Image (cartoon, rainbow, N blue to C red):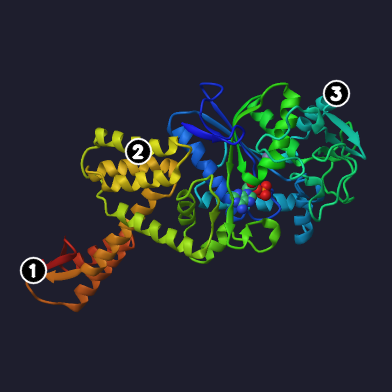
Amino acid sequence: MKLYNSATRIKEDFVPNHPDIVKMYTCGPTVYHFAHIGNLRSYIMEDVLEKYLRYVGYNVKRVMNITDVGHLTSDADEGEDKMLKGAKREHKTVMEIAKFYTDAFFSDCAKLHIKTPDVVEPATNCIDEYIKIITKLMDTGYAYFAGGNVYFDTSKLERYYIFNDFNAEDLDVGVREGVEEDNNKRNKNDFVLWFTKSKFEDQALKWDSPWGVGYPGWHIECSGISMKHLGEDLDIHCGGIDNAFPHHTNEIAQSESYLGHKWCNYWMHVLHLNTNTGKMSKSKGEFLTVSLLEEKGYDPLAYRLFCLQSHYRKSLVFSWENLDNAQGTYNKLINKIAALKVGDGEIDEEACKAMDEKFRFALDNDLNTSLAVTALYDVLKFKTNDATKLHMIDKFDYVLSLGLTERAAKKREELKKQAAAVVGFTIISESGETDAEVEAKIQARQDAKKAKNYAEADRLREELKSAGIEVTDIPNGAKWKRL
Ligand code: AMP
Ligand code: ZN
């Protein structure tokens, strides 16, 4: 498989460090608000990557953090802790907010068929890990104490910028508009590892540390959690493109300075979902959520299809019109699959191989999901029996996770019911006579059967029998005679 590596800016052959396991780390949500569908685009594409690695036979261990402390309103360590902001907004405690939005996040993920990572770790669980790393960084001179906080000294590195060739002026994060410069920093890109003094005295969560009571910076959390669960090396690190700088850049700086060797081999960044007014953002107030899509009558899986239809390295523009189109495509796809006959023939292994090759060809090329969706349509057109097609659709859907098999089965049931309703239920007597009372009882028995109330159906049959009426089921109806 070839995967574009943002750290080298080329598509590389993916080769894991260890033959038996792929170690994958994902930056999780900051749980001060609902996830917007932009955040979820990143998680959908990362989910496809994880599932495809499993599909081709890798054993994957995927770890994700939950940011419940330390992520300030500016990524340059300025402003208020986002969690505190959320708690104030809702007059709740930080931990209540964290629990509520973590649950909401996983409920959204479930609706989008995003698998929960093998390990999900709240940042507040790993304080000892961060202290261990920061202590060594202090001892080895990579970190310094100033104005009450512990900072990472970026001037100690030969190469700080990893993901881009920006010049330092462009990335002057300390003096971004509306953000006050932190005079404690020796270099403008130095970042906080441990806060003991924040501008907000009422910081809710604090822990003891060798540098005083305080809390960790956002960046150290991902390094600490990754090392706790995946050890000293990592195959793939994922996140949205906004995480590349400063978050991932800082993660690399502190992790490699701490470890003394290379940390992560492949960096996957998902480009943003934008609206026609710009980037979607939680801090902007109004934003699009999965619940809103549902309220408007969309199937969350139609949104997943919308994401799969474009490449993760291209930014994607969301509009209701685009989502309408995706919903229409999704419905048609389900109808086509529902029209295939279940159990129609033996699985044709040769055909499976040919279809699978197309699917792998698409995803092996830096996760080309739109081509993988085309490979799915090709299955429908392939000259083979329906059993083989359904088998391959189910296989592909392990990766695409569009609920194809399950939704098509539901559709088939609906169609069956509709057909039965059209055909109706005919009651005839062998003698040709009519009897309203007998017919009403036979109809009631049929209604009970339809409602799966078999006890009532049997009771009515016995009642008819006691009245000297024998009932026999016939296709789409019943026949009766007097004994
Ligand atoms: P956050 O909850 O803000 O920490 O972000 C969670 C994830 O969503 C991170 O990987 C971000 O990089 C990513 N992300 C944020 N905004 C967008 C967007 N508009 N489109 C795609 N991904 C995003
Ligand atoms: Zn992270």
Q: Position of residue 299 (x, y in %)?
A: 47, 59
Viewer-proximal residue among 65 and 472: 65
- The x and y percentages for residue 23 are 58, 29
Quadrant including the C terminus? bottom left
Measured Cα–Cα span from mark 1 to mark 3: 98 Å
Q: Which mark is residue 421?
A: none
- According to the picture, the residue beneath numbered tag 3 turns out to be 139
User: Eyeballing the image, is 235 above or below 376?
Assistant: above
Is the C-beta of the residue carrying label 2 under 8 Å from the nearest atom of ligand 1?
A: no
Q: Amino acid at mark 1?
A: Glu
Does residue 118 appear to the left or right of 257 in the view shown? left
Going from N to C along the chain, the mark reached first, 2 or 1, is: 2
N-term-proximal mark, 3 vs 2: 3
- Identify the mark at residue 358; answer none if there is no mark: 2
Q: Are marks 2 and 1 in contact (CB under 8 Å)?
A: no
Residue 206: quadrant of the picture: top right
| Amino acid type, label 3 | Asp
In the displayed structure image, the side of residue 467 where residue 294 appears, left or right: right
User: What amino acid is found at the position of numbered circle 2 in the picture?
Assistant: Lys
**Residue for badge 1:** 430
Camera-near label (1 vs 3) is 3
How many neighbours does mark 2 have within 10 angstroms: few (below 14), some (14-19), or many (20 or more)? some
Which residue is at a point 13% across and 70% down the rendered structure image?
428
